[in-house]
Image (cartoon, rainbow, N blue to C red):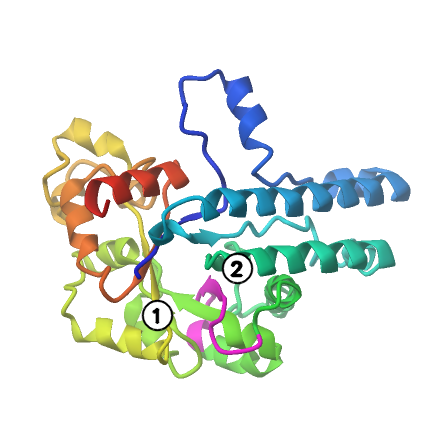
């Protein structure tokens, strides 16, 4: 069965509530964080207690979010977990705190519960480390920090009981960095076995497109982002393009995941209606290309929605939209229910 998923955060459907009311409801499902500046300025005990409090809240919040997902139709049981579950975990000035016995005990129990729940309810999980995870950088210190950040995600994946076999969990990154794919090949042997089992490479809209990712398909699966591909190549990739089949092959029998987003809704005010194909050349006569990078709140353009639907027989689709679960629910109700 194909799946649709959303990323990291819960949005309550009753948006007419006050901001305070929405925050009260949503924060029980969503992670909280802190800053290195706050932790560095606090006493050792206060910093430690804060991190413990945040870790406890975040892991419980993710379990509540999974429970919400488990009540959705089977086709909607896919979720990208937040990367902020253990704030500052990979930072060298904080990492030692997470190695303390009470932190280790908390993480072991909570992550095991998350993994067991997801498997029991057949919820497909993933992570997407942020923009500072640049394995292809030409700066050694950036590479070291990026490896630590990716292994932080691998640690969470391992504690959830995943990462033991190829692609039982997806942890997605962009190629990024001046050294690109060549740099990634250099650091590849330094990644743990869990990390190598779960890593995927996604095409971006600026530098490293789909062809660059396919050049690394011998290492890891390729995540096709059709919005990025549209911007990078100047048109929507044909669902019958031979490269789409190569993407599928890179998953080695596992059902592939693709990413789907749309540019912001304000394009409608410029004459680009919801049933009109969004043509890059026409758009760039009125907006800057960078304006197309942003994600919409909902999947407002029906032409693009119908286009994305052509991939659903072969891919699960992760929606990247500001309204998170609400955008995914809309799409499901409009096209699949």
Mark number, residue 30: none
Does residue 191 appear in the picture of this structure?
no
Q: Residue at x 82, y 38 (%)?
A: 41
Using the image as rendered, state which of residue 104 and residue 33 is in the foreground: 104
- The residue that label 1 is drawn on is 255
- Which stretch is magenta? 164-181
Q: Is residue 176 magenta?
A: yes
Q: How many numbered circles are shown?
A: 2
- The residue that label 2 is drawn on is 120
Q: Is residue 138 magenta?
A: no
Q: Is residue 72 above or below residue 127?
A: above
Of the image marks 2 and 1, the number of the one nearer the N terminus: 2
Does residue 155 appear in the picture of this structure?
yes
Q: Is residue 145 above or below residue 35?
A: below
The quarter of the rendered structure image containing the C terminus is top left
* Helix, strand or loop: magenta stretch: loop
133 left or right of 93? left
**Circle 2/circle 1 CB separation < 8 Å:** no
Q: Residue at x 82, y 59 (%)?
A: 96
Q: Is residue 4 above or below residue 184?
A: above
112 left or right of 232? right
Residue 207 sits in which quadrant? Answer: bottom left
Image position, residue 59 (x, y; %): 65, 48
């Amino acid at each position: 069965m194909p799946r649709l998923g959303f990323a990291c955060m819960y949005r309550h459907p009753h948006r007419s509530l006050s901001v305070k009311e929405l925050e009260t409801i949503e924060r029980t499902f969503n992670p909280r964080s802190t800053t290195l500046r706050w932790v560095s300025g606090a006493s050792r005990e206060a910093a430690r207690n804060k991190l413990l409090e945040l870790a406890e809240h975040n892991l419980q919040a993710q379990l509540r979010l999974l429970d919400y997902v488990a009540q959705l139709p089977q086709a909607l049981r896919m979720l990208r977990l937040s990367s902020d579950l253990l704030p500052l975990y990979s930072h060298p000035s904080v990492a030692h705190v997470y190695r303390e016995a009470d932190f280790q005990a908390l993480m072991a129990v909570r992550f095991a519960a998350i993994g067991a729940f997801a498997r029991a309810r057949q919820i497909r999980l993933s992570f997407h480390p942020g923009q500072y995870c640049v394995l292809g950088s030409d700066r050694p210190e950036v590479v070291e920090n990026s490896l630590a950040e990716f292994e932080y995600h691998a640690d969470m994946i391992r504690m959830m009981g995943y990462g033991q076999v190829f692609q039982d969990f997806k942890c997605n990154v962009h190629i990024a960095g001046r050294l690109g794919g060549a740099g990634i090949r250099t650091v590849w042997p330094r990644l743990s076995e869990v990390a190598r089992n779960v890593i995927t490479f996604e095409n971006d809209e600026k530098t490293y497109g789909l062809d660059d990712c396919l050049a690394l398909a011998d290492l890891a699966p390729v995540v096709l982002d059709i919005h990025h591909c549209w911007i990078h190549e100047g048109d929507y990739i044909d669902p019958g393009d031979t490269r789409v089949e190569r993407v599928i092959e890179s998953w080695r029998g596992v059902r592939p995941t693709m990413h789907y987003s749309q540019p912001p809704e304000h394009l409608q005010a410029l004459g680009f209606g919801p049933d009109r194909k969004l043509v890059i050349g026409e758009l760039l006569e009125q907006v800057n290309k960078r304006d197309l990078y942003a994600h919409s709140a909902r999947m407002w353009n029906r032409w693009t929605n119908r286009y994305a639907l052509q991939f659903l027989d072969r891919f699960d689709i992760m929606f990247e939209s500001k309204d998170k679960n609400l955008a995914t629910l809309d799409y499901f109700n409009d096209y699949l229910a």
